[in-house]
Amino acid sequence: MKTVLLVDDEIEFMTVVSDLLSARGFRVETCRNGTDALDRIKARPFDAFVADVVMEGTVGTALLQGIHSSPGCENMPVIFMSGMPERRVRLIIEGNYVFLHKPFSTDALVSAVNGACDHSGDCSQSTLGYPWGAPEDAARVHPRAA
């Protein structure tokens, strides 16, 4: 069973997403902020990381850097979700990740998480910019700046 760490400061939204992923066969652990999330990934491995872009005390860039600088997590697949326009998210976060715009469909979420778990977050393998098979209308990949 693939394990996903889900991070969002909106408890109701996090509960819905957790229930959706659990119903699709994922083991889901949750936390409400980036600091706790970084502590968790240092303690144990996860197959994928799904998080809101902006939470109390954490913005996506710091979270992404913290994840990918943790030993054993350098290639951890990261999926960011936000209601902000994608162009604004690109200004906030640089690095390898998939973006899901809220609201998103269950299929888009599950597709992104399945793909992330199956491909170990290797964004370099896709020439299309959608390495994990997420639907074009729901997710985008932002490769690490050279």
Image: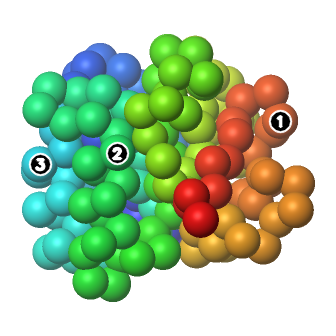
Q: Amino acid at mark 3?
A: Thr
Q: Quadrant of the C terminus?
A: bottom right
Identify the mark nearer the N-term, 3 or 2: 3
Identify the mark nearer the N-term, 1 or 2: 2
Q: Find numbered disc 1 in the image and state the secondary structure of the residue it sits on.
A: loop
Q: Is residue 67 visible?
A: yes
Q: Position of residue 127 (x, y in %)?
A: 87, 62
Residue at the far bottom: name it. Answer: 72
In the picture of the structure, the residue carrying the numbered disc 1 is 136
Q: Which one is in front, 129 or 135? A: 129
Residue at 63% from the left image edge and 56% from the top image edge: 143
Q: Report if the CB atoms under discs 3 and 2 are less than 8 Å apart.
A: no
Q: Which one is in front, 91 or 51? A: 91
Q: Position of residue 103 (x, y in %)?
A: 58, 16
Q: Amino acid at mark 2?
A: Thr
Residue 35 disc label:
3
Residue 61 disc label:
2
